[in-house]
Amino acid sequence: MGLPMSDPTAWTTAMNNLGMAPMGMTGQPLLPDFDPALGMMTGIPPINPMMPGLGIVPPPIPPDMPAVKEIIHCKSCTLFPPNPHLPPPATRERPPGCKTVFVGGLPENATEQIIMEVFEQCGEVIAIRKSKKNFCHIRFAEEFIVDKALYLSGYRIRLGSSTDKKDTGRLHVDFAQARDDLYEWECKQRMLAREERHRRRLVEERFRPPSPPPVVHYSDHECSIVAEKLKDDTKFSEAVQTLLTWIDRGEVNRRTANNFYSMIQSANSHIRRLVNEKATHEKEMEEAKEKFKLALSGILVQFEQIVAVYHSASKQKAWDHFTKAQRKNISVWCKQAEEIRNIHNDELMGIRREEEMEMSDEEIEDPAEMKETEESALVSQVEALKEENDSLRWQLDAYRNEVELLKQEQGKASRDEDTTKEQQLKLLQQALQGMQQHLLKVQDEYKKREAELEKVREDKLKIETLLETLKEQQSLADEEDKERDAIDGQGNESSTSRICACSQEKECPAEKMLSNSPVKSEREALLVGIISTFLHVHPFGASIEYICSYLQRLDSKICTTEVEVLMTRLHHTFRQELSGVGASLEKRWKFCGFDELKMT
């Protein structure tokens, strides 16, 4: 940027209008006593010319601010500003990452050196592509230099002092779309995206929980260590995770089957320890419940004492001596204490109800506990036999694997070792035969136990059916007892009815024989006695509804049709009469048993 200025006064005026300290091309101030606040253009804040990226040509000014452009003198040409009253030149939409500008309206005699001389003042120029039709494309090093180059749009350019048309022109500077600019912008965006992903990954890794330690590979030494850890309560979870990983990896084979079985068996033995631990926790929970119940009962006792104090204070002997405010506070306190006491009392009663329900459930389950214990014992025996059967099978498989390995090694070994291997094979075969016989016995015992278990289940079903039938019979017997109690409660009324019925039977046996005994059961005889006493008290008669309403108080199962049929059957004892006229017509029943006796 060491270009000499042909007219330093023009640069001083232009930079003074922008509120900048006038400086030469070498960076030295043109006016040493310049005050930036005395610029000609008001409303523009002072600009520091030493800001990074700021060259000779000032940056573009927003369109809403007035700007006065001055003449710019270069070495080979002169730039004249456009008319300030004209609108600003139009520009296209800025492409992303734009570093290239289109410059049109160049003079015909303009060369690349002249174009470089004009636009190199804005910033570093990378390349100039000039066309024969008075335009060119200029690519700058940075994006912000494009904004400075747009400042020259609208200027009239004149080469030297010539007035020929070929030496003059009007510059039009606009954004240009270049593939190189787009490619660099995309590369920059990808780089920013990579940096963002890397930053996010660092944040995620910082907050990610630490990964578990790697599981060691299987070996005999590691197997013995894991087997010892399985027997320790503090290291059981770690050892079980290692065992699970080994099994998932497929480390179980014919050689390692026995070792894995022993580790699984030790893991199974840990269940007993867990059950015992659960039992201790349940015991602690029961003790805590008892302590809570005792503490709650003590709190209730204290609440009762406080409520008693409030009640005694509310009596007239002490109540009259308190003021209104004190009485109000005492009554409020008494209500609050009673509410809290009731809440705690309900809670304690709820705990007691739950305990009573648990006790009742245990009592109900007592008759069937024996069967359940027997069944559970049989089930446990069957499970033990199953486990033993499985263990024997695994041992058989292990022995078979060993025999096969021995057979494979037998072909490779020398003849001197053949005799010893044959003896080992014979011993193993004998052991296999013994194990097979034992396995057959265990299977027979297993079948017998299963048959016994089925018999126990059938007996249990029979006992349950018998219990249901007994419960039904008991409910029926309770209903009959209730009916008998209701009948016995009738008292003197039933006795008088029975006496009347007996006297009637003694005095008129012939009539009963002729009528084929109209009273067919003891219940009907009781009904006849009660109805006769009721109608004897009502000499003018009573309707069937009235009679049935009285009888239903004694027995709710009596219906009107049954009573009416019984009374019509005994026409010598009861008589139906009609009273009233028209809408007031009513049927009444009267007792006429004594009338028949008088006639006889």
Image (cartoon, rainbow, N blue to C red):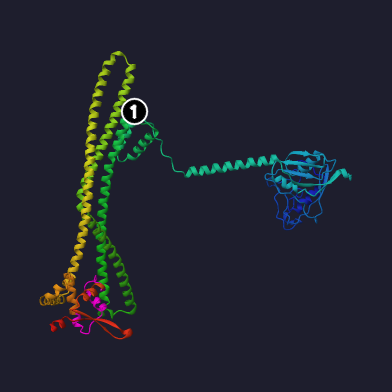
Tell me which amino acid carries mark 1.
Arg
In this view, the residue in front, 203 or 223, is: 223
Left or right: where 449 falls relative to 165: left
For residue 15, above or below residue 547: above
Residue 205 horizontal/vertical position (percent): 49, 42
Displayed quadrant of residue 510:
bottom left
For residue 115, above or below residue 462: above
Left or right: where 452 falls relative to 73: left
Q: Which residues are magenta?
A: 534-560
The residue positioned farthest toward the left in the image shown = 506
Residue 67 horizontal/vertical position (percent): 76, 55
In this view, the residue in front, 27 or 256, is: 256
Left or right: where 167 falls relative to 143: right
Indicate the secondary structure of the residue bearing disc 1. Answer: loop
Residue 360 horizontal/vertical position (percent): 22, 58
Q: Residue at x 29, y 37 (%)?
A: 266
Q: Residue at x 82, y 54 (%)?
A: 83
| Residue at mark 1 | 254
For residue 511, above or below residue 470: below
Magenta run includes residue 405: no
